[in-house]
């Protein structure tokens, strides 16, 4: 998926299309795609179908309520921290009194979201433009944008001195 395709998913048309695909059967994708392309641009339909498949797979990690509101990249869905693990780690940091965290190599934002849900202010950083855009969209989709600042930047350039803690979980590929 290109950054442009992803941006199209964030439009009202893209969101409506994604919502309509929540329970679609991937085994009938060709028929679904053919039907949808009558009313929507082909790149948007392709991006929405890909995102719908990723959302269905992400239910195991994030639960249906969050997974069907979130956005994913194929690698991000695969490597994202399971929500229960991220919540546990966030709870541990909150119990230590941590109020701000720099989440370096944030990926799609799974850990950043868990931290924000504990009331912790998060700087989420990823150098990949699409991944950073997905992390930003996830914070917005879950109502956590006020606590999560996402930056597209090389983590080596980030000044972490203003944060109580630094969390780093780099891509493992």
Image (tube, rainbow, N blue to C red):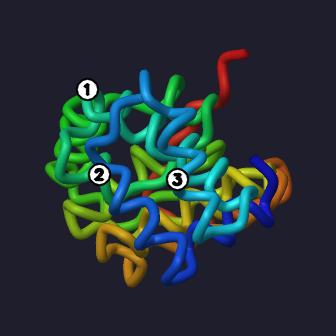
At 44% from the left edge and 29% from the top edge, which residue is drawn?
A: 28
Count of numbered labels shown in the rendering: 3
Instruction: Decide if residue 162 is in sight here.
Output: no
Q: CA distance from mark 3 to mark 1?
A: 29 Å
At 25% from the left edge and 52% from the top edge, which residue is drawn?
A: 66
SS of the residue at dot 1? helix
Which residue occupies the foreground of this view, 116 or 14?
Answer: 14
Q: CA distance from mark 1 to mark 2?
A: 16 Å
x, y percentage for residue 126? Answer: 70, 51
x, y percentage for residue 51? Answer: 52, 46
Which residue occupies the foreground of this view, 28 or 136?
Answer: 28
Choose top left, top right, bottom left or bottom right for residue 23. Answer: top left
Quadrant containing the C terminus is top right
State the residue position of label 2: 114
Instruction: Decide if residue 106 is in sight here.
Output: yes
* Depicted 120 relative to depicted 114: above or below: below
Q: CA distance from mark 3 to mark 2?
A: 38 Å
State the residue position of label 3: 35
At 63% from the left edge and 58% from the top edge, which residue is drawn?
A: 37
At 48% from the left edge and 53% from the top edge, which residue is drawn?
A: 71
Sequence-first disc among 3 and 1: 3
Q: Mark 3 packing: few (<14 Cα in 10 Å), some, or many (20+)?
A: few
SS of the residue at dot 3? helix
Sequence-first disc among 1 and 2: 1
Residues at circles 3 and 2 in contact by the CB criterion of under 8 Å: no
Residue 45 left/right relative to 111: right
Sequence-first disc among 3 and 2: 3
State the residue position of label 1: 60
x, y percentage for residue 45? Answer: 62, 55
């Amino acid at each position: 998926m290109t950054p442009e395709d992803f941006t199209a998913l964030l439009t009202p048309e893209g969101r409506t299309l994604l919502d309509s695909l929540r329970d679609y059967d991937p085994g009938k994708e060709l028929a679904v795609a053919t039907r949808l392309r009558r009313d929507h641009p082909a790149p948007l339909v392709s991006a929405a179908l890909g995102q719908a498949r990723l959302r269905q797979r992400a239910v195991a990690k994030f639960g249906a309520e969050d997974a069907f509101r979130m956005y994913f990249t194929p690698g991000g869905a695969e490597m994202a921290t399971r929500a229960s693990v991220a919540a546990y780690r966030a709870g541990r940091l909150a119990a230590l009194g941590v109020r701000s965290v720099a989440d370096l190599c944030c990926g799609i934002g799974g850990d950043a979201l868990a931290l924000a849900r504990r009331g912790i202010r998060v700087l989420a950083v990823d150098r990949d433009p699409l991944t950073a855009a997905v992390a930003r969209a996830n914070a917005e989709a879950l109502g956590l944008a006020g606590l999560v600042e996402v930056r597209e930047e090389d983590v080596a350039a980030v000044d972490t001195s203003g944060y109580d803690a630094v969390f780093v979980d780099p891509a493992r590929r």
